[in-house]
Image (cartoon, rainbow, N blue to C red):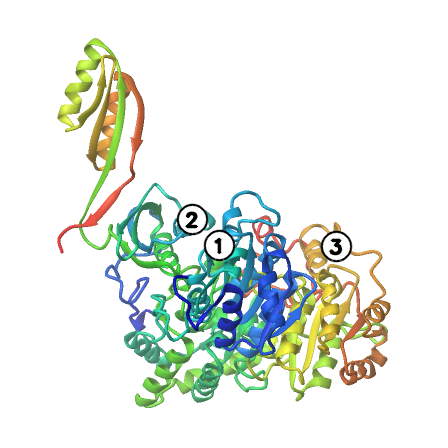
Amino acid sequence: MTKANASAMTGAKMIVKALKDQGVEVVFGYPGGAVLPIYDEIFLQNDIRHVLVRHEQGAIHMAEGYARSTGKPGVALVTSGPGATNAVTGLTDALLDSIPLVVLSGQVPTFMIGTDGFQEADTVGITRPCTKMNWLVRDTAQLAETIHTAFHVATSGRPGPVLIDIPKDVQFATSEYVTKEKIKVPHYQPKVKGDVEAITRLVELLETAERPVFYTGGGVINSGPAASQLLRELVEATGFPITSTLMGLGAYPASGKSWLGMLGMHGLYEANLAMHGCDLMINIGARFDDRITGRVADFSPHSVKAHIDIDPSSINKVIRVDVPIVGDVGHVLEDLLRIWKSRGRKVNKEGLAKWWKQIAEWKAVNCLDYKPSEKTIKPQYALQRLEALTKGMDRYITTEVGQHQMWAAQFLGFEAPNRWMTSGGLGTMGYGLPASIGVQIAHPEALVINVAGEASWLMNMQEMGTAMQFRAPVKQFILNNERLGMVRQWQELLHGERYSHSWSESLPDFVKLAEAFGCKGIKCEDPKDLDDAIMEMIRYDGPVIFDCLVEKHENCFPMIPSGKPHNEMLLGEAETQGVIKAGGAVLV
Amino acid sequence: MSALNIKKGSTSHSAYDLRDPYAEVIESHTLAVIVANESGVLARVIGLFSGRGYNIDSLTVAEVDHAGHRSRITIVTRGTPQVIEQIKAQLGRLVPVHEVHDLTVEGPAVQRELALIKVAGKGESRIEALRLAEIFRANVVDSTLESFVFEMTGTPDKIDAFADLMRPLGLREVARTGVAALARGL
């Protein structure tokens, strides 16, 4: 600093100011040696709330829950070395599900980088493949600009996590603050408007298609509430059936008359057969994930495929499409609707009537049917009761990963976007509990329920401490089968019923565990008591751990076994032995 | 649905709409990637290739615009047309990447590589090495009584051919820069 300036400040102060200028209200973090100057600044102000987590993975998942339920970027702060490496799973999770996050990590001082200093790790090297972009800031003069650019990158185009690694001496040194208005416009400016020629081609297809289906994904949610609104308008106006990936649930309401339910490996029969038999597939903000396509060679063999995606690398990555449209879902749907209306709102009414008749036959199969029981709680029943008793409430659902997650997707109905937070792409066990806290911090008055399996839930259970400390009354609805249910199911179907290490002995007593954390524990094992127990959970003013003992050997159906196409689904407890051939067994 | 007359192709504005991106032939493509010359950018590009299982046959990188801090990375890669399209799309979405050009399809391009080739030998083989070097327009940039270092510029094929010829004559070491390439014309 050659001359003193009014806007000169330390790097640490700059960080807090930049976050404030970006509209950040909450930071999820954990202090440590390399971020102490930043924590000092956090101590000295009241605008930004800091939520102290119990493990850095929890911080990232909380930031994800916050981001998914608000549409705003989530922010986390971790220290160097182990703080940063603990964040890696969460970053990868956010990258695969396109969740905007800005993660700040401390680093050893610049003069110590490369010396294997205490709590030194090559954080930008480690996180390069699991972030959309990352930066190591070596000069305080670059710090504010880097933070503003980071928010731009995280939230523009296909959203994703970014990380800024900040050495401790950079936090202490002084420089001039740069406001976000003053930074030079980053060159990263993804295209949001779709090509009108391609959109017009899609409109022509909409007008003539006999068996169309909308296949929507997380891109609709990420595009914002307006995109969901436009989608609803388009679906109502055309009368086409619509299905969605796990990530896109809520963009179109589950109560809507054109709703087929979720598609994919554990998707609904009618949704998957509609995908298989359609003549026009309109992919809106989804990415032909392997959980969706099944065997690629036999995926929807007779359809013309249109694909709307903001990321050009999603186009033709897995499935060849005929009408690619690169752009933001909201912008493209707006143009699509406008062009379709201006051409006379045409659809193939005769074809559609036949198509819906066919779909009605598939629906009649009632693929989610299960054998009810009066003695034990069936997991499906537990979710049906949860759905019935919370319907109409201001409700947010998170999940862990496994059977319970698929049952939740099948049995809970979502009427609005941003109400459903689940780890789709990475399948991160341990996601749901911290994510539920992140959601609750963003929506203090709402009912936030984490539908969990006991095994996943144990992976990040330490975050109950965070829920208690920050008075986040999250409800942990644990479907406890004392098994790693999905692993067990695969072993039954694929590995000759050799249940290698897929059950847990010596599970904790969840009620006592709840008491140990100072919150409420509820245990329920009789279907007759379930409704009252769920109501008790909802009414309790504080965090609840609900231990719902369910049928131990229930399998999740329908299921498309790996390596099979959509029209070879398994329904219910039919003959399931040997259904997955060697070729499918290598798939996950 | 062929009656709908859908044009096949990978992207709507691609200059090579008629290439079938799903053909199973392996093609070699030379890509020019213009990037912001910031720390880690090369690791980002290379990490993309290794992480997604793409091939790199040759890679060169240097800052070409000092004022604008722009580097040019020239990559020779191999893959099916679909994979090549993916590589370009994946490169294009890296935040520090400004431009991606496929010199193999964007029109004619010149490709050159520089090589230093050390050959040791005496007597007849030494004279033969020198004679071949002349035919290949390789320059002698270092010589002792028992060795030459040749410098030559050309396409990778030409360098391969020259190195193959030198092998029986006493080839010791080869250093190559990798391919630099530019589109012809304006």
Element type where label 2 sits in the image: helix
The answer for how far apart the CA atoms under marks 1 and 2 are is 9 Å
Q: Amino acid at mark 1?
A: Arg
Mark 3 and mark 1 in contact (Cβ < 8 Å)?
A: no
Letter of the chain that mark 1 sits on in the rendering: A
Image coordinates for residue A290, horizontal then vertical, percent:
52, 60
The answer for how far apart the CA atoms under marks 3 and 2 are is 39 Å
Image quarter hosting the N terminus of chain A:
bottom left
Q: Amino acid at mark 2?
A: Ala
Please tell me which residue lies in front, A142 or B13. A142
Residue for badge 1: A128
Image coordinates for residue A88, horizontal then vertical, percent:
58, 57
Which residue is found at the position 63% from the left and 53% from the top? A82
Q: Does residue A563 show up?
A: no
Q: Amino acid at mark 3?
A: Ser
Q: Are marks 1 and 2 on the same chain?
A: no
The answer for how far apart the CA atoms under marks 1 and 3 are is 33 Å
Mark drawn on residue B43: 2
Mark drawn on residue A472: none
In this rendering, the label closer to the viewer, 1 or 3:
1
Mark 2 and mark 3 in contact (Cβ < 8 Å)?
A: no
Q: Does residue A545 show up?
A: yes
Image coordinates for residue A130, horizontal then vertical, percent:
51, 57
Looking at marks 1 and 3 on the same chain, the residue that comes earlier in the sequence is marked by 1
Residue for badge 3: A502
Please tell me which residue lies in front, A544 or B4. A544
Q: Are marks 1 and 3 on the same chain?
A: yes
Image coordinates for residue B130, horizontal then vertical, percent:
17, 19
Q: Residues within 10 Å of mark 1 (few under 14, many from 20)?
A: many
Mark 2 and mark 1 in contact (Cβ < 8 Å)?
A: yes
